[in-house]
Amino acid sequence: MARKKIIAGNWKMNMTPSEAVKLVETLKPLVKNDEVDVVFCVPAIDIIPVVEATKGSNIQVGAENMYFEEKGAYTGEISPAMLTDAGVKYVVLGHSERREYFAETSETVNKKMLKAFEHGLTPIMCCGESLEQREQGITMDWIRQQVKVGFLNVTADQAKTAVIAYEPIWAIGTGKTATTEQAQEVCAEIRKCIAEIYDDATAAAIRIQYGGSVNAKTAPDLFAQADIDGGLVGGASLKEEFGKIVNYK
């Protein structure tokens, strides 16, 4: 059975609540496509107005992060229960910017993965290598380590519902995109790694996105690859161009 494509916008630290609602109203008619899952991953303060603004549409709402505890003295953090109560369906975990700027590790990402599943949230777990790591020839080793630690103690049934986003760090926000061949090669390796952890059925079910300067021109070729099941889109998700990415055919 063919995997349904999932195309998610990662807004990062952009859009005030009022700006977010305006953007949703602009994008709503442009991203209509029942053949793909469309997700807007928005800043925490935008979640409630965006959930309200997307009601009745094909858009689902995701968060850009969450903490792995239920509640408590964790000033500034957001719990999974807060997200689900607000109407969130997806959560981005382990984005390279979180790892680089906020000292997140694969171990903390794993804790968040387990907590997300516990609350019925679908994680979009990010992995990716730096330019230095690619030039050193250790891309596959690095990615496999991120995937194996990230999915530690995750059951096969849970893993089948997860999303993995492969984002080469050197291609995020730089205007550089991995070649179609490079992107497919790593996504195929990720699927192979999932098969090793679980089995072929789990590997066949899990959806793997490519992210890193995805735009309307590169999307069709990328999404046509056997192991690329959509995209995690940064800058282009804040523009009308996102509609063309969602309707890439």
Image (cartoon, helix red, strand yellow):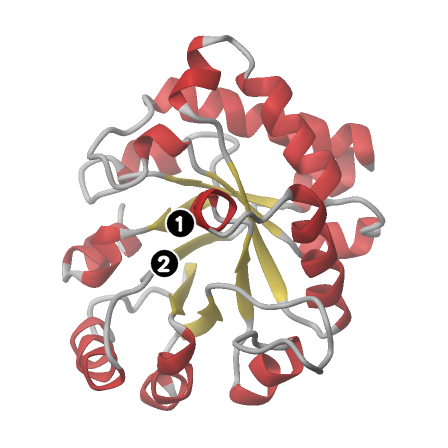
Q: Is residue 242 visible?
A: yes
Q: Amino acid at mark 1?
A: Leu
Q: How many labels were placed on the picture?
A: 2
Left-right relation of 198 to 168: right
Q: Is residue 199 visible?
A: no
Q: Name the residue that disc number 1 marks.
A: 232
Q: Residue at x 52, y 64 (%)?
A: 65
> Which quarter of the figure has residue 222?
top left
Nearest the eye: 178 or 244:
178
Query: In this view, which residue lies farthest toward the top?
Result: 136
Q: Are marks 2 and 1 in contact (CB under 8 Å)?
A: yes
Nearest the eye: 151 or 71:
71
Quadrant assignment for the C terminus = top left
Left-right relation of 46 to 67: left
Residue 133 placed where, x, y %?
Answer: 48, 18
Residue 219 placed where, x, y %?
Answer: 28, 40
Nearest the eye: 57 or 14:
14
Residue 126 placed where, x, y %?
Answer: 53, 45
- Element under label 1? strand
Answer few, some or many: residues within 10 Å of disc 1's Cα (few below 14, many 20 plus, some between 14 and 19).
Answer: many
Nearer the N terminus, badge 2 or badge 1? 2
Q: Residue at x 46, y 42 (%)?
A: 100
Q: Name the residue that disc number 2 marks.
A: 10
Q: Residue at x 64, y 69 (%)?
A: 121
Question: Nearer the viewer's eye, disc 2 or disc 1?
Answer: 2
Residue 21, above or below 208: below
Distance between mark 2 and mark 1 Cα atoms: 7 Å
Residue 218 placed where, x, y %?
Answer: 24, 35
Q: Amino acid at mark 2?
A: Asn
> Which quarter of the figure has residue 164?
top right
Left-right relation of 65 to 25: right
